[in-house]
Amino acid sequence: MKLIKCYVSSFGKLKDFTYDFNDKLNTIKQDNGWGKSTFATFIKAMFYGLNGSKRSVAENERIKYKPWNSTERFGGFVIFSWKDREYKLERFFGNKESEDTAYLYDVSTGKVLSNDKDWGKRIFQIDEEGFLSTTYFSQKDFSAKSNASLTEKYNQISGIDDSLAVDKVIQKIDDKLKKYEYSGNRGLIPETKKEIYRIDEEIKRAESSLETLKLINSEIELLSQEVKLLELRASKLYTEIENANRAEATTLKKEQYNRLMLEKSALIEKQNYALEILNENIVDIKTVNKLLIYNQELLGIDAYIENIERDIKTLSNIAPQKKKNNFGSSIISFIITLMLLLGGVFTSNIAILPFVLYSMSGIMFAVSLVITWRNAKSCNKTVPDASALLLDQKTTQLNSLIEQKNAYKNEIDTYICAFKLGQISDRATALMNILSVWEISLEVAEKLREVNRDLSALNFDNTENLSQDTSYDICALKAEFDSVNIAVKQKIEELNKKKASVAWYEDIAGKFADFESEKNKLCDKILEYEEERKILSLTSKFLKQAHENLKLKYKTPLQDSLNRYFEYINGQEKPVYIDVDFNVTVEEKGQEKVIDYYSKGYQNLFEICKRFALVDVLFTGEKPFIILDDPFYNLDDQKLSSAISLIKKMSVEHQILYLVCHDSRRANELQIEF
């Protein structure tokens, strides 16, 4: 069988890729990441499909090789020759196996021969696991494992029929053996024994049930009488509690009415007090806040009046008001004015408005003084004395502040006098009291509305007479009533349990004969199961022994081929053995060791030789192609050279696809026979 051509429409990172095969050695040398393993998997997938049953991306081929950012199906075709005819096998894959398609065409006629998806097994006569253990060398898994498919293949070429059927029969027998008895005390036999033990316990309970029934029936009669007495007492207590509740409700209603009336009386008294102070006035909160600001400004005005009076006294002691035009005296006057101005600034710390007026007047006076002096100088006129001018201005400013102060006082005092506050120490306290009384009046009015609503809802007639019977202790009655109810409930539960147990014991006693019969049947089953298990165990043993004898027929040619390949690559002879399950051991100093004792390179070497030996033994007719996905990367230089020489030699009879990433492992020319 030979590969002729393949086309990858889309598969993993490969897209729109075509490759034409030659009949011998096909070496593809590309860097890591090019897609060599992807290409090898594509060839395998064309014949066997994709494994999509695993969860992880690394193990699930369908997920791993589906192109990124694509919802389209992926795949391609491969053209190959088989039994002297050329075929085209086309396969495309979807998100799941049911969406896959596979068609086989006859290249010469172009007709569709089949849409069967299992073409790999039909052509190579081995399943996918067998293919991966022989002609497909993957970096991921070197080991070749024995399986039913490989055994069937060898038995076919050896003339032995139905090997696979034998494997299936042995497996079925072993599976059936597990049903009888296996780990964890599970299976038909131990479970049947458990059932017999359970029935024995049931029989014991049935034997003692009759005596127990007599005792239970007497207890049921006594409990029934106790329940009746307790129920009568509970009914009487309920009537007494109802009477006590009615009396208590009337008492509570009266108490609530009296409490509301007392609260209403207190609120009315508080309301009258507030109305007397307010004197039928409605308080505007904005107006009161404005007057509080005026009162605060009065403190600042008083401070400025005191400063201005001090300034006027100072100015009155300065030189006469008129002098000749003298530049030096003018400068002195200007400095005095500026000092007075600055003094007014630094002594102000209460209210901003008087300070602004005071400062602006000083600045304007200073500016006018300079202008007057310049004009007088240019016209040779007399310059007025600056201190006299400032004295006049200070006097005017003082009169203005006194007028503003009196206006604020009059407005505040007029507003306060409208209320009956009594003796108040200062204006701010009076204004705050007005606000407080106003808020109290509003709060009292709202509470009075609520109390009147509650009284209306209570609908209590004050002339209603209370019950004359006040001897009820309702708390004691309720406590006794609850206690009696609990006792009734407990007695009823106990009674029901007794009745239920009677039914259960009666049922057990009536089934005594059935339990005995069932136990006898189960004992017979135990004997039957033991006999069947013995027969199956012997059958499995003899079949396995016979099957091992069949495998021994192809052990010798497989052993010879393995040693020949190992000696060729290793360069020296070493006793290497293989058993019927393809496990390899090596003789070292008279002792056989498994290959796990050897280096990774040697382990790969043993597996490579084993695979080549399997190809020789299993495919005696039409030779299959071989895929080598860079299997020699762990070999040293000497063994690598021998391995490359070997694949060149094998390419004479086998078509080989050799994928490699390094020039040192490249192979292009044919090697001479060995």
Image (cartoon, rainbow, N blue to C red):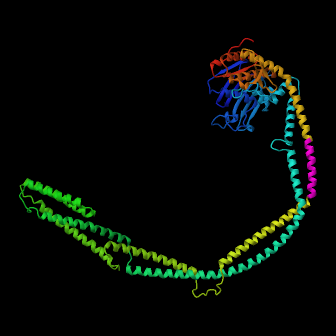
Residue located 62% across and 86% down the image: 466
Q: Is residue 267 left or right of residue 160?
A: left
Q: Can residue 518 be seen?
A: yes
Where is residue 319? Give x, y as percent: 8, 61
| Foreground pick, 134 / 549 | 549
Q: Quadrant of the C terminus?
A: top right
Say whether residue 522 is magenta: yes
Q: Quadrant of residue 389?
A: bottom left
| Foreground pick, 389 / 299 | 299
Where is residue 502? Give x, y as percent: 86, 65
Q: Is residue 306 above or below residue 536?
A: below
Q: Is residue 148 left or right of residue 478?
A: right
Say whether residue 646 is magenta: no
| Foreground pick, 437 / 223 | 223
Find the magenta span and give its range: 512-530
Where is residue 104? Give x, y as percent: 77, 29
Where is residue 33? Give x, y as percent: 62, 27
Q: Can residue 624 be seen?
A: no
Q: Is residue 501 left or right of residue 19?
A: right
Main structural element of the magenta stretch: helix, strand or loop? helix
Q: Quadrant of the N terminus?
A: top right
Residue located 66% across and 79% down the image: 474
| Foreground pick, 446 / 430 | 430
Q: Is residue 594 above or below residue 97?
A: above
Q: Quadrant of residue 181?
A: top right
Q: Is residue 673 above or below residue 139?
A: above
